[in-house]
Amino acid sequence: MDNINLQLEIDKLKSDIKALNDEVYRNNFSAHQDFNKSSNFSTKLKIPSYSVAPTTCEVGEIIEVSGVMKICSATNTCTTVGTQT
């Protein structure tokens, strides 16, 4: 191979390495990320409100029934969250 072909190969390899590097770090803040233990969100969680608890629910659903927050702890079973008065 002559020097021109070698330089073309080197340029191609550099281009490929840059493309791979861009792919790896795309949508990352930096090569080193430090995540805090807590996060602040500015959005509100909208909880459905009912006057009577629904007869069906999926585990993990959060609802409010007559001012009392409840979570679906088992299929079709709502449990009051914490102690509320």
Image (cartoon, grey):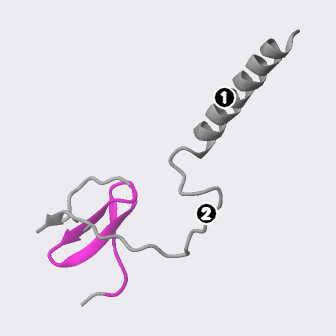
How many residues crowd mark 1 within 10 Å: few (<14), some (14–19), many (20+)? few
Q: Is residue 2 left or right of residue 29?
A: right
Q: Residue at x 77, y 19 (%)?
A: 9
The span shown in magenta is 59-83
Mark 1, residue position:
15
Q: Is residue 62 left or right of residue 60?
A: left
Q: Quadrant of the C terminus?
A: bottom left
Q: Position of residue 68 (x, y in %)?
A: 22, 78
* Residue lying furthest top: 1
Residue 33 got which mark?
2
Q: Position of residue 49 (x, y in %)?
A: 15, 66
Q: Dot 1 lies on which element?
A: helix
Residue 84 got which mark?
none
**Foreground pick, 71 / 5:** 5
- Give the amino acid at mark 1: Ser
**Foreground pick, 69 / 31:** 31
